Image: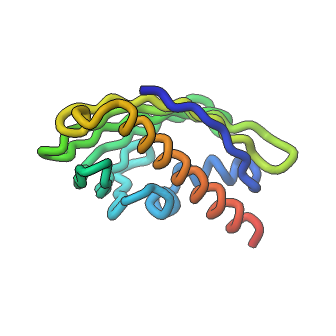
Amino acid sequence: MQLKDEIIINAPQAVVYAALNDPEILKRCIPGCNELIKHSDTELEAKVVLKIGPVKAKFNGNVTLSPDAPPERFSLTGTGNGGAAGYAKGGAAVELEEHSEGTLLRYTATADIGGKLAQLGSRLIQGTAKKLAAKFFKSFADLVGEDNAA
């Protein structure tokens, strides 16, 4: 499954890039995130609870950040295990571009799921993934734009 979108954030590129690497900001924006632990500048551990259709699962996962060309571009990869509910793994390429209203954030994300989650059907999973991504980026844009305005 692949997701693509873009959003304008009312903050300079350097501020947006720093926020994307700040575990406290990410924790506040990731839907269902209970814990986000920074092990190094590139390694994070996450604990997330999600309900996808009839399946509610607690995922334990690891995220690796790869600063390709900061602050214009970076990528991340992650894996999560939801026990009996299944697993998820994927990644995202993020581009940040100066914009008259702040910063244009463009992303392309890929995901692969297995277990009970995969049995729910691709339409439900794709729809839920789009909603979760949209919720994350809206929360992120609101939080970073609000902090920048203050």
Q: Nearer the viewer, residue 104 or 55?
A: 55
Q: Position of residue 80 (x, y in %)?
A: 27, 42
Q: Quadrant of the C terminus?
A: bottom right
Q: Position of residue 107 (x, y in %)?
A: 58, 34
User: What residue is drawn where x is 36% and y is 42%?
Assistant: 63
Q: Nearer the viewer, residue 52 or 69?
A: 52
User: What residue is drawn where x is 67% and y is 35%?
Assistant: 72
Q: Residue 145's image quarter? A: bottom right
* Residue reaching furthest to the bottom: 150
Depicted 22 relative to depicted 125: above or below: below
User: What residue is drawn where x is 36% and y is 58%?
Assistant: 36
Q: Position of residue 37 (x, y in %)?
A: 34, 57
Number of numbered tags placed on the structure image = 0
Q: Position of residue 20 (x, y in %)?
A: 56, 49
Depicted 56 relative to depicted 28: above or below: above
Left or right? Give the position of 61 relative to 23.
left
Left or right? Give the position of 111 relative to 142.
left
Q: Quadrant of the N terminus?
A: top left
User: What residue is drawn where x is 45% and y is 35%?
Assistant: 76
Left or right? Give the position of 21 relative to 91.
right
Depicted 41 relative to depicted 109: above or below: below
Q: Residue 89's image quarter? A: top left
Query: How does the figure colour the protein chain or chains?
Result: rainbow
Q: Nearer the viewer, residue 45 or 133?
A: 133
* Residue reaching furthest to the right: 100
